[in-house]
Amino acid sequence: MLPWLEATEADVICLQETRANDGELTKALAPALDSGWHLASAEPSMKGRNGVAILSRTAPDAVRVGIGAEEFAESGRYIEADFSDVTVASLYLPSGEVGTERQDEKERFMAVFAKYLARTATSAIAEDRDVLVCGDWNIAPTELDIKAWKTNRKKSGFLPEEREWVAALLAPTSPWTDVVRELNPEVEGPYSWWSYRGKAFDNDAGWRIDYQLATPSLAERTKDAVTERAEAYDQRWSDHAPVTVRYR
């Protein structure tokens, strides 16, 4: 990741599933921090799990952690930072498994988070602020967002109720826009995650589960987007690919 950081032109970077406490993350990113990047992180209460962070070229004006629910207060799943008139958030929505507590947890998070997003957008628009929520949503919204959609219809990440939840967030009356899909309305993908199992990466059998939701005025200023898929399997430094969007 460090070589990628040296090369990127991004001003703000959202990280998910850091699996590190603040000290470990600071140590791992020391070269980047020494070169001028600023770090804000939400470390997980469970060692080796979750964790989100925001790297920025300028120091944030304010940082907030969590979505206002006690159950997820220390889960390391959400952090947001203010930069002038823009708030940028890093999200790691729970992954699930049908028929298990993990899926129940995911659905509880989704219920709380939908309300949080609604409140956030309402407040931001009233204050003439922009908000951008970036991250690993662990849901492929439509058939265009997953290669093998027919065989995954009963699996977490592509369940009908999960897709309906995303659709509600992006309804015509909603203030949120999936900016990558807006730029690529009929494109399969661009996929951002590939399982390490089998030949998923080589066959581009991926999922688009990493996306950026923007409030109206910021969404209108979207310039372009690229999913930075590695050229070869052995050049990957994650099972996800960075999703980089430029705004005017």
Image (cartoon, rainbow, N blue to C red):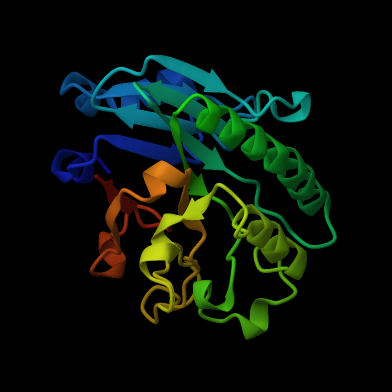
**Closer-to-camera residue (190/172):** 172
The answer to whether residue 141 is left or right of residue 19 is right
Q: Position of residue 90 (x, y in %)?
A: 48, 37
Whether residue 94 can be seen here: yes
Residue 6 sits above or below residue 33 on the image: below
Q: Position of residue 239 (x, y in %)?
A: 43, 58
At x 56%, y 47%, the residue is 175
**Closer-to-camera residue (124/210):** 124
At x 47%, y 66%, the residue is 196
Residue 11 sits above or below residue 165 on the image: above
**Closer-to-camera residue (93/167):** 167
The answer to whether residue 155 is left or right of residue 183 is right
Q: Quadrant of the C terminus?
A: top left
At x 57%, y 22%, the residue is 65
Whether residue 77 can be seen here: no
Residue 140 sits above or below residue 198 on the image: above
